Amino acid sequence: MTTLILALAAGAVVGLALGGLGGGGSVLAVPALIYLLGFTPAAATTAGLLIVIITSLTGLVAHAREGRVRWRTGGLFAAAGIVPAAVAGALSVRIPSGVLTAAFAVLAMVAAVRMLRPRAEPAPQDSVPAGRAARAGAGLGAVTGFLGVGGGFLAVPALVTVLAVPMTAAVGTSLLVITVNSTAALVTRLATPTALDWAVIAPFTAAAVLGAWDGQRLAAKVSTAWLQRIFGAVLLAVAVLMLVDAVV
């Protein structure tokens, strides 16, 4: 019963992050699966991708209904990350779990700092150079595949600062990118058999899906910067604990 409650609570937080911020879901899901629910790092990153794919699709539908998805920009960004995500996903299974955990913790710290110190939005552009979108997408795809994260916490800043997508559309557009990149990474990971506890993954995912709907509604009512700072503080604490655990 305790495991079920933990899975539901963690899933709800992951869903809120994805629905409200367009990112931060998997970077919270992986530590929760490892430290609260007893998954190995390899199983946690694989399960995290699966959870984030389903949850991101839910959030994407909600944002698309409100017209907050830039399909062309998001499509270019996501397409460029498919191959890097697949290649990095195949390579990641050869990395020792301690190294993987430490790398994940460092990346989580970077994401937390970005959330705690949100940047001002640049002026929106009518069109985005395809080359710029492709370069940003390829880099994000590699990170997604290697560390088993959806990459939304990096996609949103990239969409806003590099591709000049308004914040109101960046959250929804990032969910498109997350879904594509995570699917590419998951396909390669499934080629290597990994034991997954579906009794935990199922309720975790269900709670995340419901949380994504709530997060999308919350984002329409509450300042995005305020939400970012809350999740950033939580993420920074989690990242420090993961890094200490990996190093000690």
Image (cartoon, rainbow, N blue to C red):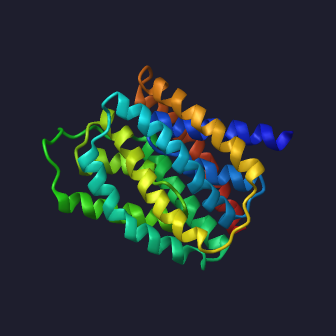
The answer to whether 196 is drawn above or below residue 17 in the figure is: below
In this rendered view, identify the residue nearer to me: 147 or 73: 73
Direction bottom: furthest residue: 94
The image shows residue 48 at horizontal and vertical percentages of: 60, 54
Quadrant of image for the C terminus: bottom right
- For the view shown, which residue lies furthest in the left direction? 126
Q: Is residue 62 left or right of residue 160?
A: right
Residue positioned most to the top: 221
Q: Is residue 38 visible?
A: yes
Which residue is painted at 47% across and 24% down in the image? Answer: 217
244 or 210, which lies in front? 210
Q: Position of residue 2 (x, y in %)?
A: 85, 40
Give the answer, above or below, for where 128 lies relative to 4. below
Q: Is residue 228 visible?
A: no
Task: Give the residue displayed 65% in from the left and 76% down from the top.
Answer: 96
Q: Residue at x 30, y 31 (%)?
A: 67
Q: Residue at x 60, y 68 (%)?
A: 190
**From the viewer's perspective, is 218 left or right of 197?**
left
- Picture quadrant where residue 102 is located: bottom right
Q: Residue furthest right?
A: 1
Report how many numbered discs are placed on residues in the image.
0
Q: Position of residue 11 (x, y in %)?
A: 65, 40
| Image position of 158 (left or right of 203) | left
Occupied quadrant, residue 140: bottom left
Residue 38 x %, y %: 78, 56
Assign the N terminus to one quadrant of the image.
top right
